[in-house]
Amino acid sequence: MIFASDNWTGASPQVAEALLVAAGGYAPAYGGDPLSADVAAAMSRLFEREVSVSFVGTGTAANALALAHVARPAGVIFCHSTAHIAADEAGAPEFLSGGGRLHGITGAKGKLTPEMLEAAIGLYPPEAVFHGQPASVSISQLTEAGTAYSADEVSAIAVVAKAAGLPLHMDGARFANAVVGLGVTPADITWRAGVDMLSFGGSKNGCFAAEAVIFFDPEKAKGFDFQRKRAGHVFSKSRFIAAQFAAYLARDHWLDLARHANDMARLLADGIEAAREARLALSPDGNEVFAFLSRDADQRLKSAGALYYPWPASGLGVGEAGEGEVLVRLVTSFRTAPNEIDQFVGLID
Ligand SMILES: Cc1ncc(COP(=O)(O)O)c(C=O)c1O
Ligand SMILES: C[C@@H](O)[C@H](N)C(=O)O
């Protein structure tokens, strides 16, 4: 019963096999290999328009470098207060952007609302040199609450960002889970909805370490690779990141992996809803389940070897844990087995 994080999960056999095949022979270094070009073409097909694709090694690098690329002096990056860029990246966005600051907005279910974003931007009038100047907006898809923005919700955020002249970034560490959960195309919830830059994550969903920054207008990617190089993310053997993505995207393998993870999360959420010693905090849109467990159930689960994290209620908009309860995050993955769910549910019933 491993529900700590999809960061704990290994790699898909198809991705592993592709990496072994790519290990043979020679190939031009630093992105000049044919496989890297193939992946760029595959991503353009996937997003139904020409896109630029830049590989990086972690989701944090993808986020921080994308936001650094659009940074401004005394720039302010608007995001959710629980956003990974605010809570779990050790100041990488601020550091790589040369001192940009994050302005956290606490909308329910891990989401920004257009109204809250507009109000926050309004706190930084252009002539107010003391407060800094708006630089960008970043949303997570899935959010850190395991929820997904609908295409209309993304569009509404983009309208406010564009009205203020701000680029919109999407942290897609779990983008695959959002696409499957929403039943939409990748284009529908990105550039068609006004997203300018996407951190396209593969590491949590079956790759070893494969992340990419996608610009939906390749013109706006000019100069980005200098950001990437000086942060040490221009890979000498780029073909090994490319090989992972090639296998990941082939025949929609990435969606199959995410679909299984989401299905397991739904199964888990249904079991929690029916249980006597647990209650669901939020209905999952992807592969993250937030639940209140009784402390007795929490103890029983841990004694049985279940692994998961307690989770702060702030930003979820679900209220605090009651007396004798604990709020936890349960993350499923492509490797989660139905019998793990059955075992977990059997211990909270
Ligand atoms: C929502 C979200 N964004 C970004 C990241 C960053 O990824 P990494 O840990 O690879 O830097 C994570 C990590 O799990 C995440 O959960
Ligand atoms: C840092 C931790 O939150 C990680 N991003 C995860 O989702 O597991």
Image: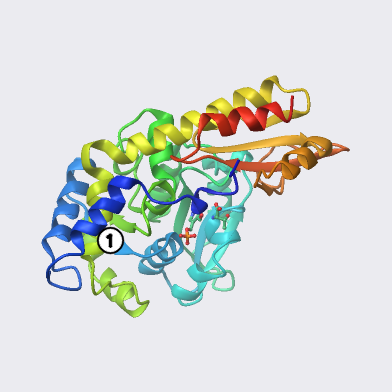
Residue 68 appears at what percent x and percent y?
Answer: 40, 69
Q: Is residue 44 left or right of residue 226?
A: left
Q: Is residue 83 visible?
A: yes
The residue at the point 50 percent across, 34 percent down is 337
From the viewer's perspective, tell me whether residue 272 is left or right of residue 181: right
Q: Quadrant of ligand 2?
A: bottom right
On the question of residue 216 being in view, the answer is no
Which residue type does callout 1 highlight? Ile
Residue ID at (13%, 65%)? 33
Disc 1 crowd rating (10 Å Cα; few below 14, some 14-19, many 20+) is: many
Note whether 176 is above or below 26 in the view shown.
above
User: How far across and how far down the image is residue 218, in percent?
Assistant: 20, 58
Q: Is mark 1 within 8 Å of ligand 1?
A: no
Scheme by which the image is coloured: rainbow
Q: Looking at the image, is 327 positioned above or below residue 56?
A: above
Looking at the image, how many numbered discs can be counted on the residues?
1
Identify the residue at the far bottom of this view: 230
Residue 307: % across, % down: 65, 47
* Front position in the image: 258 or 2: 2
Mark 1 sits on what residue? 241
Give the quarter of the figure containing the N terminus: top right
Q: Residue furthest right?
A: 323
Q: Which residue does the image show at 43% across and 33% down from the upper left?
A: 260
**Outermost top residue:** 274
Position of 118 with respect to 185 (left or right) is: right
Residue 185 appears left or right of 285: left
- The location of residue 237, given as percent across then percent down, is 23, 70
Q: Quadrant of residue 268?
A: top right
Q: Nearer the viewer, residue 314 or 58?
A: 58
- Viewer-side residue, 240 vs 310: 240
Secondary structure beneath label 1: helix
